[in-house]
Image (cartoon, rainbow, N blue to C red):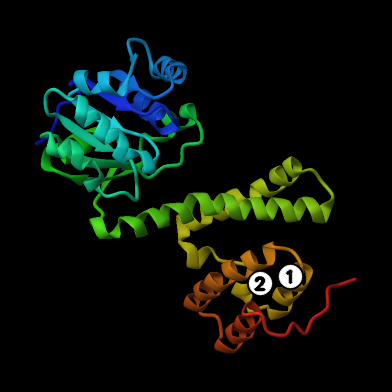
């Protein structure tokens, strides 16, 4: 059962995702009329960001007004907010939470009140509302839940020119871990690279970031266009154990040494798939596992 986009909707939550979804959907024809949050001032600001005609309300008021609700709060707060909405709802409707690793069952208080419940998770990074609103169209959206809820989620996905993604409930944690690797851990790895370059070259972190930018962009473009195996370059791909040893020696006493080793192990697995010779792979594996480093750092 597909829900028509012209049916009014409300959003529970006032964070980056809530605001980004609100604006993106409003711009695509969904009448987002209400947004609810705990902090009145923040809720007012979120309503203004989404667009004219959006009314800031309490969770209880949202439950009484909106027949369709997107719950875009922190994962740990979804159950509590669902309970608040269920306690105040006067007629059943449709509710979708927007979390990636949380089961639809967290909305059970609403389901017990007759709501069709589901999830609608954008596979996208949102660091501020304006960036998120621009990035959401064209993204993938993971959909699950009762037929009317999933139907509404599919409709929203279509409006956002998105790709619907079906992930079994017991695989949601692994799906969400994949998103963390692609986004959060990418930020962590680049932060490590920025810190090392800034220290090695005695430059400011911002300068280091700009210096790394062409390398990062070319690497990501190559990976997305050719795949990780074809795009892999560097000392592990070449079987250059001596260079790996020099890196590990230079990182002695640095907490990033453990991160280098952990990332290196998976890079080595990728290099093996690409055809790295077994002898070269074994030498690098020995170094990454913390065995003797027979090379000195250059003077």
Q: Which numbered disc, 1 or 2, marks the residue that appears first in the sequence?
A: 2
Q: Is residue 274 above or below residue 292?
A: above
Assign a secondary structure to mark 2.
helix
Q: Is residue 162 visible?
A: no
The residues tagged by marks 1 and 2 sit, at their Cα atoms, a distance apart of: 10 Å
Most extreme residue toward the front is 87
Residue 29 appears left or right of 134: left
Callouts 1 and 2 close, C-beta under 8 Å: yes
Between residue 50 and residue 211, name the one nearer to us.
50
Q: Is residue 217 above or below residue 65?
A: below
Between residue 176 and residue 285, name the one nearer to us.
176
Most extreme residue toward the bottom is 279
Q: Is residue 18 above or below residue 109?
A: above
Residue holding disc 2? 235
Residue 250 drawn at (x, y percent): 78, 68
Residue 96 drawn at (x, y percent): 24, 36
Residue holding disc 1? 247
Residue 3 appears left or right of 58: left
Q: Which quadrant of the structure image shows residue 40?
A: top left
Residue 198 appears left or right of 36: right
């Amino acid at each position: 059962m597909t829900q028509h986009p012209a049916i009014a909707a409300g959003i529970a939550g006032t964070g980056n995702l809530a605001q980004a979804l609100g604006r993106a959907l409003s711009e695509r024809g969904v009448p987002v009329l209400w947004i609810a949050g705990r902090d009145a001032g923040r809720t007012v600001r979120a309503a203004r960001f989404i667009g004219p005609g959006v009314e800031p309300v309490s969770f209880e008021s949202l439950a009484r007004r909106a027949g369709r609700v997107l719950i875009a709060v922190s994962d740990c707060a979804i159950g509590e907010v669902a309970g608040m909405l269920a306690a105040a709802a006067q007629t059943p409707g449709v509710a979708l939470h927007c979390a990636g690793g949380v089961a639809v069952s967290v909305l059970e208080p609403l389901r017990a009140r007759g709501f069709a419940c589901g999830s609608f998770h954008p596979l996208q990074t949102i660091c501020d509302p304006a960036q998120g609103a621009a990035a959401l169209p064209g993204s993938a959206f993971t959909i699950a839940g009762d037929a009317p809820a999933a139907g509404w989620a599919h409709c929203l996905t279509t409006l956002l020119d998105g790709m619907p993604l079906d992930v079994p409930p017991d695989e949601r944690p692994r799906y969400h871990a994949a998103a963390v690797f692609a986004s959060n851990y990418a930020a962590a790895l680049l932060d490590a690279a920025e810190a090392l370059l800034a220290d090695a070259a005695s430059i400011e972190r911002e300068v280091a970031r700009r210096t790394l930018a062409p390398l990062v962009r070319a690497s990501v473009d190559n990976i997305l266009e050719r795949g990780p195996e074809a795009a892999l370059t560097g000392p592990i791909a070449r079987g250059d154990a001596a260079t790996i040893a020099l890196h590990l020696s230079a990182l002695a006493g640095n907490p990033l040494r453990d991160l280098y080793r952990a990332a290196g192990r998976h890079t080595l697995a990728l290099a093996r798939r690409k055809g790295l010779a077994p002898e070269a792979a074994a030498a690098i594996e020995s170094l990454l596992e913390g065995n003797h480093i027979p090379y000195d750092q250059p003077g």
